[in-house]
Image (cartoon, rainbow, N blue to C red):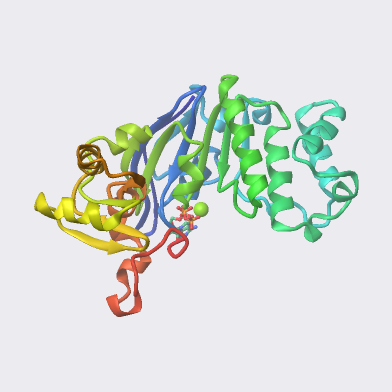
Amino acid sequence: MITVEGLTRKYGAFTAVDDVSFVCQPGRVTGFLGPNGAGKTTTMRVMVGLTPPTAGRVTIGGHLYKDIPNPGRHVGVLLDASAQHAGRTGREILTIGAQTMGLPASRVDEMLALVSLDATESKRRLRNYSLGMKQRLGIAHALLGDPSVLILDEPANGLDPAGIRWMRGLLKSYADRGGTVLLSSHLLHEVEQIADEMILIGRGKIVASGTKDELLAGSEHTTSLVTALDNELLAKALREKGVTVTPAGSGLRVETAPVEVGRLSVEQGIVLTDLRAADGGLEELFLSLTEDTQREAIAPAAAAPAAPTQGAQA
Ligand SMILES: Nc1ncnc2c1ncn2[C@@H]1O[C@H](COP(=O)(O)OP(=O)(O)OP(=O)(O)O)[C@@H](O)[C@H]1O
Ligand SMILES: [Mg+2]
């Protein structure tokens, strides 16, 4: 288990991480989510002793990282997949890791197979690896010592869609076997499908944390998007109830909760083909909680023609 207690990291007058506390439990995948520059990498660097904290501390299984003998056997770390000797081959990098940790050479082949780097690729130098291949090698390196804790900074960065799905499965089964996983991302969609717990950070401060359900509890839906076989009939019925309805795409945007739309459609015998909340989702929560930390929000309104999408603020 990872315990972060009152962690603060200042660079001169600037506070990159501001009194952050949270816990990552074994058997759970914890997502560490925040916009660019929120302080995720800094927090993770402190965890593994690469950056000293200004105040507070992080323990892993009750110990400071620097006090853990042969740490690679307990904590798997991937912070920057490029931070390896560029002239070494993937196989060499893993072999050196295995030797340092006192592991049999067979472990290297196991890990290469696990991350689907084939024999030719494993003999290529790191400088000639693609971004996704570096990332796979980094994951292999983190898992080499069969650790019980994984700390991964933006591990999905550069992976193709199949790679992202593969990693999701890998981390889920790792947690199911009792492992502790902390992974960071600035992309909500990447994290929400895999994380059991989520820690939201903005401008160095934790702005929310909990399971998806806990985070969403209390955020009421007040707008729906609905499509019916007969949209006009549905719009008429809704307007008769005093609800504001506007056309949206192939359906309607309705200023009431989905449950109310569903209820009315049953009463009136109107067949719906699609019904969902148009607000109050996790994305909206994430954006609103980290609002003052988003670069896009600083830009003048004229420069932002539409609501920012997930990609636009990545
Ligand atoms: N060595 C340093 N000196 C000065 N400022 C730093 C240093 N390291 C980090 N910072 C600042 O601390 C803040 C947090 O950076 P950090 O890398 O932790 O963000 P992040 O959440 O990982 O962002 P991203 O999603 O872009 O990776 C940034 O404003 C960054 O410029
Ligand atoms: Mg980062």
* 122 with respect to 43 (left or right): right
**Residue at 43% from the left image edge and 46% from the top image edge:** 33
**Residue at 49% from the left image edge and 26% from the top image edge:** 28
Asked if residue 278 shows in the view, the reply is no
**Residue at 78% from the left image edge and 41% from the top image edge:** 116
Q: Quadrant of residue 12?
A: bottom left
Asked if residue 146 shows in the view, the reply is yes
Above/below status of 29 relative to 11: above
Above/below status of 111 relative to 230: above
Count of numbered circles in the view: 0
Residue 26 on image: x %, y %: 50, 22
| Residue closest to the far bottom | 302
**Residue at 20% from the left image edge and 37% from the top image edge:** 267
Viewer-nearest residue: 96 or 80: 80
* 134 with respect to 177 (left or right): right
Viewer-nearest residue: 59 or 272: 272
Viewer-nearest residue: 123 or 191: 191
* 287 with respect to 35 (left or right): left
Residue 38 on image: x %, y %: 40, 53
Residue 135 on image: x %, y %: 68, 49
